[in-house]
Image: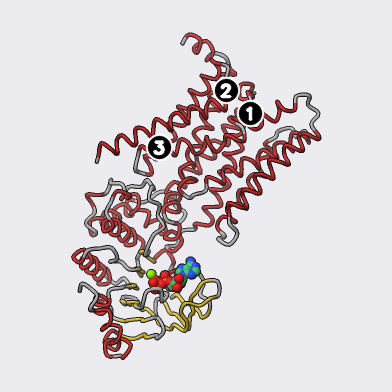
Amino acid sequence: MDKIIIYMQYPFVQNALIVGILIALCSSLFGATLVLKRLSFIGDGLSHVAFGATAVAAVMSFADDMLLALPVTTVSAILLLKSGQNAKIRGDAAIAMISAGALAFGYLIMNIFSASSNLSGDVCSTLFGSTSILTLDRKDVWLCVLLSVFVLTVFVLMYNKIFAITFDEDFAKATGVRADEYNLIIAVVIAIIIVLAMNLVGALLVSALIVFPALSAMRLLSGFKQVMICSASLSVVCALSGILISILAGTPVGATIVAVDAVAFGIACFIGRASRGARK
Amino acid sequence: MALLTARNISLGYDSIPVAEGLNFHVDSGDYLAVVGENGSGKTTLIRTLLQLQNPLGGEIVLDDGLRKNEIGHLPQQTAIQKDFPASVREIVISGCQGRAGLRPFYTREEKELAEESMELMDISELAVKCYRELSGGQQQRVLLARALCAARKILLLDEPASGLDPSAAARMYDLIEKMNGKGIAIIMVSHDITAAVNYAKHILHIGDNIFYGTKEEYIKSEIGRAFIKEHRGGETA
Ligand SMILES: Nc1ncnc2c1ncn2[C@@H]1O[C@H](COP(=O)(O)OP(=O)(O)O)[C@@H](O)[C@H]1O
Ligand SMILES: [Mg+2]
């Protein structure tokens, strides 16, 4: 306990906690929508695209990886969403191709062009998250705050629309809701979240960060708003404990957060089943 | 002018027609029942009228004054997932989303409208209940309450009484008639030919033979007599 209090006074720990909380909050909000619209696979595919883009950005020595990863991921999100709506091209096959392709190209490019002496270390940290969350500077924190505020604002303003098109897109369209436009905005926001969250947990673990809290909340509660609030709180608590554990125990940050999320999901399943059993 | 006019429309999927050559119109305050055998294209017709799919041919003309967000809809089978977490109240008020337009939050009037619709459907005491835990009949009433929130001029219903026991079905038809009495035009697909001829003003019969006309004309017509005879026996009318 004393150790935590001492650590809390270091600015790098404070930065990591701020960024961790914001990313966990943003990523959990759209998790339920992705799960319920059967789009979780898009999150997975996009994170691989973001990995490929980050690899290219690293090789081209961009000042900031995000400058490339953000637009590329956004465009892919829009394309994947469109192909998912088109019943003739099966969306998941397209995504499997894109995501595996992006992964392969990203690794190849890093392998061929990388000047770094620690290649496998670089690849590993892009895939599973680096300790870079512990070495954030002011600019990183501000960028993250800015993007998070944007994501949260969009979520609050669109909450009722998100519910309507998630619950019953056909009804929404038939009664004059601009579902296509809203879907587009959601895709863009999800791309932002994925690029943000990649810094925290790495490309391979992003979709877990997005989906786990929502799935846990859905086990426990039965209203949409309740699920949103619960999954946001759960995600923040898990990220906080994950970061603290990783600092104390020296484990990798991203994997620790996702492991905590997974444990929370297990507990939620257990409680959900027990309370459902009790009602019967 | 008619709220909605169908001129020689054909319906279908992937350019394979299901029904062809449909002509009819719905005036404001009208009550049109769509009848026909299973698979004759009734659901396809409703989805086409709602512009969820395009007609293969012909045209659907909406009155200038009819905007999309004045249309209500009760789908036949919603693909709503079994595990969707949503309370009854959340679902009912989502029917106001069309009229909300770009406005992010619901107004007090819209919240009141949702409460009134729930009262009308007798589901007020279920308001905070979870949709997925309701019976089929209760779910149907929730979706109709949502449709009422959306319908200002016209209401399209696809098998509103399916899955309801006879007394609940009768209540459902009474409620729809009440809406019609308030001046909202109704287009209702029904399997229940007895209800269709009891309540509707016009009948559209689709299938191998097509009929469109008033209910009285339908009852006298050959196609109507045959269809009624064939199906009335089986119904729990
Ligand atoms: N999504 C679809 N794709 C292709 N064919 C369909 C689709 N939905 C329905 N059909 C076909 O269209 C015909 C009419 O279906 P439907 O409109 O549901 O009939 P009804 O509502 O009168 O029972 C059926 O033969 C059905 O097999
Ligand atoms: Mg049908």
Q: Give the number of the disc on residue A127.
A: none
Is residue B66 in sight in this rendering? no
Q: Which residue is mark 1?
A: A140
Tag 2: residue type?
Asn
Q: Secondary structure at mark 3?
A: helix
Q: Same chain for the residues at labels 1 and 3, yes or no?
A: yes
Indicate which quadrant contains ligand 2. bottom left
Q: Secondary structure at mark 1?
A: helix
The quadrant of the image that shows the C terminus of chain B is: bottom left
Indicate the position of residue B178 as horizontal and vertical percent values: 23, 69
Tag 3: residue type?
Ala
Q: Which residue is mark 3?
A: A217
Indicate the position of residue B76 as horizontal and vertical percent values: 36, 65
- Nearer to us in this view, A246 or A111: A111
- Nearer to us in this view, A2 or B28: A2
Q: Secondary structure at mark 2?
A: helix
**How many badges with numbers are in the image?**
3
Q: Are marks 3 and 2 in contact (CB under 8 Å)?
A: no
